[in-house]
Image (spheres, coloured by chain):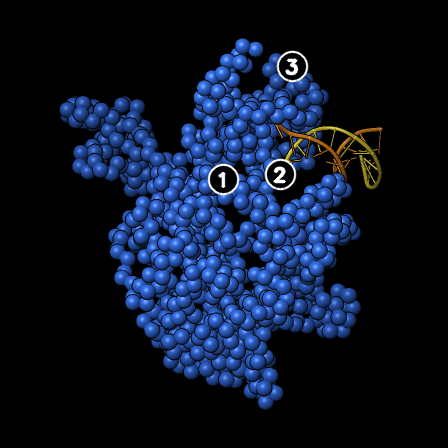
Chain colours: A blue, B yellow, C orange
Amino acid sequence: MFRIYFATFVSTINCRPILNFAQIILPLNLKGTFTYSVPEELVSVIQIGMRVLVPFRGKKIYTGIVEELHSNIPEAFIPKPIINILDDAPIVPPQQLKFWKWLSEYYLCNKGEIYRFSFPGSLKLESETYLKLKPGAVIDLQHLDVNELYLIQALEVRQLISLSEIEAFIPKKEIVKTIHSLIDLQYIEIDEKVSEKYRAKEIAYLRLKNKETLVSQLPEVLLQLKRSPKQKELLLLILEHDTANSEKPLRKSEVFESGNFANAPLKSLIEKGFVEEFYLQKDRLEAYEGETEAVEQLTEVQQQAKLQMDLAFNVGKNVLLHGVTSSGKTHLYLDKIEETISEGKNALLLLPEISLTKQMIQRLEKKYGKRLGFYHQKLTDFEKVEVWRKVRNNDLSILIGTRNALFLPFQNLGLIIVDEEHDAAYKPKEVSPYFNAKDASLILAEFYQARVILGSATPSVESYWLAARDKLKYIFLAKRFGNVALPKFKLLNFKEDRDTKHVKGNFSLRSIEAIRETLEEKKQIMILHNRRGYANVVECSSCGYAAYCSNCDVVMTYHKFSNELKCHYCGHKASKPSTCPKCFSEHITARGVGVEQIYEEAARLFPDASVERMDVDSMRRKFAYEQLYEKIEEGETDIIVGTQMISKGLDFDHIELVVIPRADQLLYIQDFRAEEKAYQLIHQVSGRAGRVSGAGEVLIQTYHPEHPVFKLIQEEDPGNIYHYFLEERRKFNYPPFTKTILIELKHRKEDKADRASQFLGSVLKKYLPQECIFGPEKSPVGKINLLYQYQILLKLPRGKKYKDFKNFVMLSLEEFDEITGYHSVKKNIFVDF
DNA sequence: AGCACGCCGACT
DNA sequence: GTCGGCGTGCTC
């Protein structure tokens, strides 16, 4: 009683109640946070944003993040105590915690999902379950089966064995049974252990032990070694190194690399106390050590753009930098980055895919050297941790990365640049949490009081609209660097050419002629065909049978190169049937033109030219991309046939001609963004042509030369095509005029998925006006990977109402979750999909 | 999410 | 008769 009174008394004086409870975010896809008590000895140490070890469900231990500290005793349950604190300072800055909160609320996902996604695995320690022999157990080996015997014998040799290690010697199916039976017999018990995962990389070095003494007694020492010439030689080598250039220590591996020494002489020298081994930590990622150079002067036009940018930034407005390809956007980026870091702040440059931008990386390395860091999915986990630590210690000024770099613990972020802001890689549909890195950048920047540049040659319609309404400052760079002319577009009416027999296969004679001319000039050609494989349907012309994927509701694509059928949804492979499996007819035909076919045709039409194909299938081999890149750069390749892959990162000086044989294919895809995407793709590839000469030409073969996209793409002023896109979006109530939410429901059993979607639909209809709800209906691809898929599309009004409507959506989802029968239905929610 | 508990089919 | 399937419930 007295204690309680005393505590209250003290806290009143300090105006600070004791914060002995914490809300913890766990790396699990669970709603909300969990309350833990803070042990007395940790109360003064714990801070928001630190990592803590907490028990969760029995003995299992997780690494959680402290989101909040408070003194409200929970009533419904007794909180468990925090086991320990892992950091001596917060690892997640407050701005990032706000960012997580915003993401989870806006994108309707759990914070645990965000935490799991944003942290490198080895910073999230988890306990592992170990087995050990029960002390004092008397084991009767006679009555054990083979697996039990194995396990007991293993435990007698090694005291602790983790669950994952057991898989090595007991069949997976038997593990649980074996363990349970041994626990029942009281022979073994279970224990949980947390171990540090991250290990600094250490390099072994050699040096003299007690250098001074040794040197002073050198004659005696050498005498002592006179019968061991190798030891003597080695000692002298180390001595020489240690006295000569003591700057760089001698690497152990260096000594052995020469092949002169074996391990034995070294061992003897160490035993005799002349030499010692020592270890130094080493960064896994090599920092650039070469010369750095200054940022080049901006041109007149770029100077103008920069001026506008500064004006916008000064009034707290972010920028949409719309610059045609090779207009020098990168140049402007570098200038702003330079400015940011000279103010002592960090800059973040986001790219859609790091691998395709080697030139950009090299260019920046030359400018910023050690102050530059990279962060992307291809780093190993330990490499990620190292970048994390450096960012937290503010050792890096500039970060280049993909979307997950947004979650690095920046101390003082001043600028975010989102390059190629229209790119779909910023919001992949495959990985949760589903968020758009472009939109998220604007929010994160707000929390850091940082500025944002969205850059693109073909901005997204959404960003263009924001700029049109002056929510973003619109800056347009209309001309290529050095006033090089933009490529000329030419529409070829393929129907006419075909009717007058002016075609060969998929190529118009006019295209063939243009390619031939370009080849004669020793220039390069790109042919774009955005469809993988050889043919997209294999069917029987007698009975109409088509080869479907066994897991998905789609036809399989025929890949002639690898001679197999592939499902592009689940990756399932099958061999191509030579007779119809249904009617046994031999009339198996392939329909639908894929990039392999276009490649084959091009190679046949131009037998003397070197033709290469570039798509995910041909680039899967390691370094395939780098090798082809070099070949093109060296001028060894004349014609590059490829999918959308060729539209990114291939900046070569000698590409003059781009041909798009079946351009209509790009437009007629079931997606309200199809035309925008087609425009972006065509525009991006065309930007590869005539970058130096200004004589670039783009041939678009189409059955519909009157289509607005084809008509408007030829104009150098992009205003009209964006107005066309916006008008279309307005007409059909699509973003940016509405806000969309797509809910997908999947289940192994079709009727369950169907009923679940019907039910959720009916709940939504209770709260939302009918005209906002589209569906429930079967998804365009009704089955993927054996899961049946249904969907509901919501088109909600923008602005103030949106928040209310979204609350109703959340309410509906909660009501849906209350039905236990639907818990096995997998639910995906895409906000602004 | 993952892990334990509880009720119905294919095997010794 | 059991073993094991996955439907259901809960986690501070």
Q: Residue at x 46, y 23 (%)?
A: A15
User: What residue is disc 3 on?
Assistant: A138
User: Which percent across, then down, holds residue A197?
Assistant: 48, 34
Instruction: Tell us which disc is closer to us: 2 or 3.
Output: 2
Q: Quadrant of the C terminus of chain A?
A: bottom right
Q: Earlier in the sequence, mark 3 or mark 1?
A: 1
- Rounded to the nearest angstrom, the CA distance separating label 3 from label 1 is 53 Å
The amino acid on which the numbered mark 2 sits, given as a three-letter code, is Lys
Q: Chain of mark 3?
A: A
Residue A97 circle label: 1
Q: Are marks 3 and 1 in contact (CB under 8 Å)?
A: no
Q: Position of residue A654 (x, y in %)?
A: 37, 73
Q: Residue at horizontal 46%, vertical 82%?
A: A514
Nearest the eye: A54 or A342: A342
Q: Which residue is at a point 30% across and 40% down the rendered structure image? A: A254
How far is disc 2 from disc 3 in space, using C-alphas? Answer: 46 Å
Name the amino acid type tagged 1. Answer: Leu
Q: What kind of element bears circle 2?
A: loop
Task: Specify few, some or many for label 3: CA neighbours under 10 Å numbering under 14, 14-19, or 20 or more.
Answer: few
State the SS at label 3: loop
Chain letter for mark 1, please: A
Q: Where residue A830 appears, x then y in whole percent?
A: 61, 52
- Left or right side of A404 for A216: left
Q: Position of residue A745 (x, y in %)?
A: 69, 51
**Residue, disc 2:** A31
Residue A393 in sight in this render: yes
